[in-house]
Amino acid sequence: MKLCDSGHEEVCYEGRKCPVCEMEKDKDKDIEKLDEAIDELRDRLETAEEEIGSMRVRLAELENKEDGQ
């Protein structure tokens, strides 16, 4: 049995690698992927909000044009 204390609670294990360290690496990779997805969604939201703003301006222009006829 080996004893690991790599910044987490001490864990006894058999084998070459500490299972908690491996789970933490997996967790960190998952968090990184989620952060990337969040960034992508924020970019898409920003683009959508800009498009909505442009559409509102265009709609106002069309409404003003109709009122002027």
Image: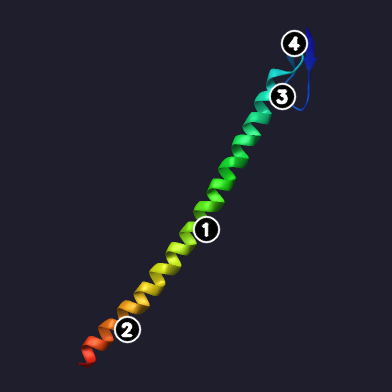
CA gap, disc 2 to disc 3? Answer: 60 Å
The numbered disc on residue 61 is 2
Mark before the other along the chain sequence, 2 or 1? 1
Which residue does the image show at 20% across and 92% down from the upper left?
69
Q: Which amino acid does label 3 sit on?
A: Cys
The numbered disc on residue 43 is 1
Q: Which amino acid does label 4 sit on?
A: Gly
- Closest to the camera, between mark 2 and mark 3, is 2
Residue 12: x and y in percent read 74, 11
Is residue 62 found left or right of 38 in the rendered image? left
Q: What residue type is labelled 2?
A: Glu
Q: Which residue is under mark 3?
A: 21
CA gap, disc 2 to disc 1? Answer: 27 Å
Q: Do the residues labelled 4 and 3 touch (CB within 8 Å)?
A: no
**Are there few (<14), some (14-19), or many (20+) residues within 10 Å of tag 4?**
few
CA gap, disc 4 to disc 3? Answer: 13 Å
Q: Quadrant of residue 56?
A: bottom left
Mark before the other along the chain sequence, 2 or 3? 3
Q: Are marks 2 and 1 in contact (CB under 8 Å)?
A: no
- Closest to the camera, between mark 3 and mark 1, is 1
The residue lying toward the viewer, choosing from 6 and 58, is 58
Q: Which amino acid does label 1 sit on?
A: Asp
Q: Which residue is under mark 4?
A: 15
Q: Do the residues labelled 1 and 4 touch (CB within 8 Å)?
A: no
Mark before the other along the chain sequence, 1 or 4? 4
Which residue does the image show at 73% across and 11% down from the upper left?
13
Residue lying at the far top in this picture: please name it.
1
CA gap, disc 1 to disc 4? Answer: 44 Å
